[in-house]
Image: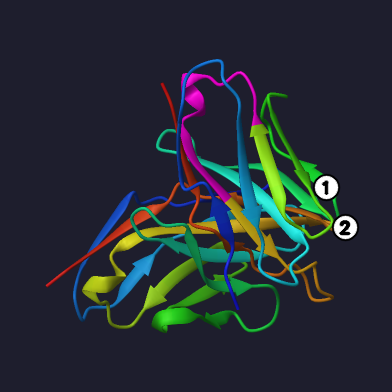
């Protein structure tokens, strides 16, 4: 069964500093990986995805993620954090069988960016 | 382009009642998935519909059911509500899988269900 792990419940970073939110995955086939962000009382917003190709994926709001097959990781990064980036971040893996699919989410990492 | 809409946004029910939640996907999206989000269990997949057919189902009891209409709108129903069903129910839509793999899902704001 596919799974993702987010080892950190919370990440604290000062505004202007780089940030990393960690994610590792376990899949039996090709990994289709996603990052989503959730602001309070809101649904999830898509940030970026890795399907195939370049290991460095660029996404919305200046975020990027690095796919590392040997380490089975897909860490989310941003060179310079903003206070407005404070939110709950979810890594997810998509299992695709024919036209059936489902997302399996990690437990989420709360990012707190302070001045 | 309008996003995914879910109605109602908030619901309060009592144990034993049933509830129906509605989801309208982004125009042109034919795949609709439902997820349950709770503080204890996190985000869990309920089911996925594509072209009015349930394509995948998560590990939930039969009290949870859904359907999809010809216009891709979807409903989910929970019967005989239990306190533990209190959660944020999220609907997501996406295009059919492309040749390079699955497309991203776009989520609605969710329906907050409280069971008393």
Please state the chain letter of the residue tagged with numbered disc 2 in the rendered image: A
Does the magenta segment cover residue A15? no
The residue nearer to you, when weighing B71 against B38, is: B71
**Can residue A72 be seen in this snapshot?**
no
Left or right: B89 in relation to A51? left
The reply to whether callout 1 and callout 2 are in contact (CB within 8 Å) is: yes
Mark 2 lies on residue: A98
Part of the protein shown in magenta = B78-90
Chain at numbered mark 1: B
Q: Is mark 1 on a helix, strand or loop?
A: strand
Near-viewer residue (A102 or B82): B82
Task: Looking at this view, name the residue that lies furthest to the top.
Answer: B16
Q: Which residue is drawn at 28% across and 65% down?
A: A86
> Per the image, is B85 magenta?
yes
Residue A50 sits above or below residue B54 on the image = below
Closer to the observer: label 1 or label 2?
1
Q: Is residue A97 left or right of residue A74?
A: right
Q: In which quarter of the image is the C terminus of chain B?
A: top left
> Spatial distance from mark 1 to mark 2, Cα to Cα?
9 Å
Image location (x, y in percent) of residue A113 = 21, 67
Number of residues whose C-alpha sits closer than 10 Å to that of mark 2, classed few (under 14), some (14–19) or many (20 or more): few
Residue situated in front as seen by the camera: B11 or B92: B11
Q: Where is residue B73 in the image (x, y as percent from the top left)?
A: 72, 55
Q: Percent from the top left, x then y, of residue B1? A: 60, 78
Q: Which residue is drawn at 69% across and 82% down?
A: A53
Residue under the image location 44 percent in, 70 percent down:
A76
Q: Position of residue B6 (x, y in %)?
A: 56, 53
In this figure, which residue is indicated by the disc labeled 1? B55
Check the image and report above or below for A90 versus B43: below
Task: Determine the secondary structure under disc 2.
Answer: loop
């Amino acid at each position: 069964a596919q799974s993702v792990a987010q080892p950190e419940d919370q990440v604290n970073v000062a505004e202007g500093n780089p940030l990393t939110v960690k994610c590792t995955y376990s899949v039996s086939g090709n990994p289709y990986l996603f990052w989503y962000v959730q602001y309070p009382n809101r649904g999830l917003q898509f940030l970026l995805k890795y399907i195939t190709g370049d290991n460095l994926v660029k996404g919305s709001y200046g975020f990027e993620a690095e796919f590392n097959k040997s380490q089975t990781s897909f860490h989310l990064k941003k060179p310079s954090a903003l206070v407005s980036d404070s939110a709950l971040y979810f890594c997810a893996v998509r299992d695709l069988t024919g036209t059936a699919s489902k997302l399996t989410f990690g437990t989420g990492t709360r990012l707190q960016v302070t001045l | 382009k309008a996003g995914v809409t879910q109605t109602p946004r908030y619901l309060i029910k009592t144990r034993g009642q049933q509830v129906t939640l509605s989801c309208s996907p982004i125009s042109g999206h034919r795949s609709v998935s439902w997820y349950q989000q709770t503080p204890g269990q996190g985000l869990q997949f309920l089911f996925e519909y594509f072209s009015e057919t349930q394509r995948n189902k998560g590990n939930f009891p039969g009290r949870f059911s859904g359907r999809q209409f010809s216009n891709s709108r979807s409903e989910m129903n929970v019967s005989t509500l239990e306190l533990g069903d209190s959660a944020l129910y999220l609907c997501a839509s996406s295009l059919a899988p492309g040749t390079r793999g699955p497309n991203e899902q776009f989520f609605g704001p969710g329906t907050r269900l409280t069971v008393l």
